[in-house]
Image: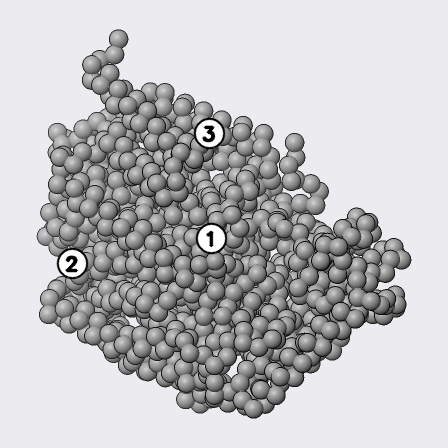
Amino acid sequence: MMAPAQQERLRGYLLGFVLALLLSLVPFACVHYQWLDRFPTMATIGICAVLQVLVHLRYFLHLRLSEAKERFWLLVFTLLLIGLMVGGSLWIMWDLTDRMMGH
Amino acid sequence: MGRGVITALFATLLTSGVVAEPSQLNLRRGVTDISAQVYDLHMTIFYICVVIGIVVFGAMLYAMVFHRKSRGVKPANFHESVRVEVAWTVVPFIILIGMAIPAASTLIDMEDASQADVTVLVTGSQWKWHYKYMDRDVEYYSVLATQPEQIANKFNKGENYLLEVDRPLVIPTDKKVRFLVTSDDVIHSWWVPDFAVKKDANPGFINEAWAKVNEPGIYRGQCAELCGKDHGFMPVVVIAKEPADYEAWITEQEGIQRKAKEEEQKLLAMNMEMDELMEVGARVYQSACAACHMPNGEGLPGVFPALKGSAIATGEMTKHIDVVVNGVSGTAMQAFGKQLSLKELAAVITYERNAWGNNTGDTVQAKDVNALMTGK
Amino acid sequence: MTGRLSWEALPTYGAIVTFAAVLVLSLIVMTVAYLTWTGKWGYLWREWLTSLSHKRIGIMYIIIAFVMMLRALLEAMLMRAQQAVALNNPGFVDAEHFHQLFSTHGTVMIFFVLMPFITGLINKVLPLQIGARDMAFPWLNAVSLWLTASGAGLVIMSLLLGRFSTGGWSGYPPYTGIDFSPGTGVDYWIWALALSSISTTLSGINFLVTITKRRCPGMGWMRLPLFVWTTACSSILIIFAFPSLSVATLLLALDRTLDMHFFTNDLGGNMMHYVNLFWLWGHPEVYILILPAFGVFSEVIATFSSKTLFGYRSLVYATVVITLLSFTVWLHHFFTMGSSASVNAFFGIMTMVIAVPTGVKIYDWIFTLYRGRIRFSVPMLYALAFIMTFVLGGVSGVLLAIPPFDYVVHNSAFLVAHFHNMLIPGTLFGMMAGYTYWFPKATGFRLDEYWGRLGFYGWLVGFYLAFMPLYLLGLMGMPRRLQQYDQPEWQPLLIVAGAGALIILLGALCQLIQLIVSIRRRRTLADRTGDPWDARTLEWTIASPPPEWNFSVIPNVDERDPFAAEKGKGHAYPLPARKDYQDIELPRNNGLPFVLGVLSFWLGFALVWHLWWLAILTLLGSAGCLARRSFQRDSEKRISAENLYQYDRKRHQQLQKLAGHHALNEGFRWENKVD
């Protein structure tokens, strides 16, 4: 028999695994079976992706905001960098849409 | 100290470039107002940098000379000074702002291609440029004029042999000419140093640039983005003519192109002889096909297929015409239907079917090509 | 069964290539023969290939870097020679081969010379500087090493079978798509990069965790040696930027092998995404490469000026600001791609702003020199040459940051001169300085000064001759990547550049001689004290080379430059009491990382040549390795406190003897002979 603490850990990992799997399958299914229109499909993919990240942080990397101040700031820093990268990319690509043929 | 000598050498190198022969070893001033602005910007910043360099290197050399161990100095123990540190953060910042303002205003000028007098669509493809005058009925390909044998050292070369094209772009002086730049296949970049214009030709995108040339003349440039084997053989030649001369030229071109189209219609009704087709075909093959399939028709193993003895060039004629006219999607084989005239297409296909021992004996006529193109 | 592999893959398309392939093959055969002849295979396996020690791993990284550098230098020489003769002349390298040359040169220099060199130095030094016994994840560290090695192996393989990419080191689609580059070249490039980028990401995580978790007591953030700071920032950049490269190359691989359309023009693809993703990694990469070098120079300049760093705090802040800003400038690599004036202006201004913190660093270093006691030893020569030359490169960088100017010289020889000016006197000189500086720490003997100086002057003079003309050529309008040209006024400058490359090659040769001479004279050059330069940080308190466990007792630090401070106070070599020693555990050697490396090499090879059965086998094998590791229980070995104590006592006695009539606890400053 497993110790209760170990069982608890296993349960955490399994839950995380199932959630991660679901969050991957849903977008694929959305695209494959064409359940929704173009925009709602893209929104679903985006939301699933963000949730996926959170699931990984919570269940696999065991990050909890309550634990330490340091971690909070690390998270803020991470968000800042990702914001720069994603925001910058969106800006650059958006700026180019006028130049695309067929627009 | 060896370094002092080297610095001096370098300084001489740079200053000799700037002072002694300004036109030779420096940025070109170019022939547009914008290119002159860029040149001035470059020189201003260069001089600012020289001053900064003298101060910084001076301090460093002083320390290197006077504070070396062999002079028996004792190291000092200071390690911070907020005032100095703030100063050398703030001062460069201000200098940079000083540089950024004129830079931004030049940039805005460069990007403002509106209200152009003439618009030319520049399309890059492996490895040539296509020019289309948007407000006139003129368009043509501009291909490296040098023959492959010349490049390979077999014939004598002329001056600018790599920068010479069969049909240069012609634009008027003193008029704002807008270039719409795009590509048919991979990324190219249309660059004319004297105009301070370099725009990437991206497939699927149309980029803009413009120039208002002050002096008539011939201006040369090259493709500036790696685009494959003949990237180095994709010159840009622009001739700037006085507006009146330009007008005369473009009207003449319109006439020629109209006549060519009429000729083509006539051509459909007649047959050309094998000899003439082979002669024209050989010429077309050298300029349009030989870059990939090689002058001897043997291609490049693994990259470009051989035509000598190939199934297509010796097989069914319509299939062969189809490949040349429409290209093969998913490969580097372009569609030549729009790049070459009917006569040229007929000639080059005939050539391919009869050269290098492919002796099929077939002659392909303009009407055969036209039949395929129009789906008849 | 054989996929795309056929007899045509053999390197018979040019005499130079065939010669190079034969050369590589014979070098491999000779190495194998030598190892067999001397019966060193067992030793190699036990002591090196299976080692998880950060010190061994560091050395192996640097060996990879030097071997690959030799190849990339020879390629550079070929290109320079070609351009020197290619006026109205096809020269001796055809266009296709020339394009392969610059593609391999760039790829190898960035991914398999500079990156391994940096990773190697960090591996070697980082734990020592923060008073740790090893990296946080030693096994992962070995995996990183062998992934890099397998990537390097793939690049070498491209010389023996098939060809390398002709798409340049940045490999823009659509040209690198399957339509326009149907051969195996781009696949070699993709999979070598993929292996290297995964390896680097793992290393970055390892370094950052080590720095946050393994600092010795008292080693607060504001007491970290600058090299550790720059490593930390570089690791942050790696962690955030490298996934972008991995994604870009893997998507390109999907386009090529599975007929997907991420970067094609049809079916909704967009090649601008590739360009954006590539440079989203590419610009931070520049700082990933330069920051550790900044760290090395900070250490070297402080040590050889016998003075604490001026403006430690501002150096740290500058490093952090650069880290942040380096994520705001990537578009300056593609100003000409069609972005509008506002976008270009924003990224141009951000790029100029990044010059400010970099300038702060330069001033801090100069003020560290000022009123110091400067010793011109080889690492210091590199540092001084760096400051001078790097400023020139920085200035050309500010020029390039201005979009109107960039429009004119982008993709010209000016650009080539600029980034070589940043990477050679910046990163490479930093690595050379670090290599010379920490060599005694790694091996127990110093490198020969005379040959080291010759090597240095070779690199310095060669650099100026090779790249200053390129600045001028770029201004004159010469595009980069030209196999042939017809402008007579370019040729003299290109000949000078060729001569410069030759001098660089001679410099590298001097360094090779230096290594051989130093090994032969290792007794005279021996570093018996562990502190050959009168240095300032923790790694110099322990023996050279350090024992397996680095520090017998984890040190306690209460200020910056702890060793210099202790020497000043006369407590340089304290001997802890017996009760302070505790048993320690170190990771046991493990062969799995090496096996993983070999498997991933063959995986890469299989993916290049479409050998699907091999790909599946190697993938299963790799998964098996990971599973096997998860079940390994007995992965640590113990070293008893008594052993550690005895070791320390013995070393202390030796030091005592060396010090003679001098006061041992003030260090060995008197022993320093370099002026």
Residue C48: x percent and y percent?
43, 36
Q: Position of residue B295 (x, y in %)?
A: 76, 63
- The residue labelled by disc 3 is C622
Residue drawn at (58%, 32%) of the image:
C612
**Residue found 76% across the figure and 51% down from its top:** B319
Mark 1 element type = loop
Question: Do dots 2 and 3 share one subunit?
Answer: yes
User: As shown in the figure, which amino acid type bears the numbered disc 1?
Assistant: Asn
Spot occupied by residue C449 in the image (x, y as percentages of width and height): 38, 60
In the picture provided, is C506 more to the left or to the right than C432? right
Which mark is first along the chain, 1 or 2?
Answer: 1
Q: Which mark is on residue C313? A: 2
Tell me the residue that label 1 is attached to.
Answer: C270
Q: Earlier in the sequence, mark 3 or mark 1?
A: 1
Q: CA distance from mark 2 to mark 1?
A: 44 Å
Amino acid carrying mark 2 in the image? Arg
Which image quadrant for residue C548?
Answer: top left
Q: Check if mark 2's residue and mark 3's residue have beta carbons within 8 Å.
A: no
Q: Relative to residue B247, is residue C613 depicted above or below? A: above
